Amino acid sequence: MWRGHPALCKHLQAAGDDAARNATERKKCTGLLSKLTKWSFLAEVAMIKDALRPLQELSLYLQRGRASAVDALFRVETL
């Protein structure tokens, strides 16, 4: 979502301005664009983006057969 956000916004803007689409479709595109460009939405996407890497590393660590709960707790504290 983070990397594709500019292209998605550009597409929704073009779709919202496209006279070939009916009014309902244009209004949906415009409304979605409005939500996607709000500061609060972008902040949430940025926080999720920042959290995904450590969560992925922790998940892969826990999937190892020799990982224990104590090891996982120590791993979380060092991330």
Image (tube, rainbow, N blue to C red):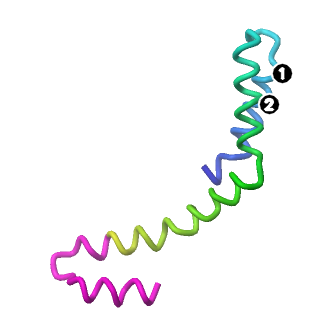
48 sits left or right of 18 in the view = left
Q: Magenta stretch?
A: 60-79
User: Which residue is at the front of the view, 44 or 2?
Assistant: 44
Residue type at mark 1: give it: Asp
Q: Is residue 4 left or right of residue 33?
A: left
Residue at x 77%, y 9% (from the top left corner) = 20
Labelled disc at residue 13: 2
20 falls in the magenta region: no
Residue that label 1 marks: 17
- Amino acid on which disc 2 is placed: Gln
Cα–Cα gap, marks 1 and 2: 6 Å
> In the rendered view, would you say 71 is above or below 49?
below
Vertical relation: 20 (above or below) 38: above
Depth order, front residue of 8/51: 51
Name the image quarter holding residue 10.
top right
Give the residue displayed 75% in from the left and 23% down from the top.
15
Q: Look at the magenta stretch and give its main secondary structure.
A: helix
Q: Percent position (x, y) of residue 65?
A: 16, 76
User: Which residue occupies 57% across, 62% down?
Assistant: 49
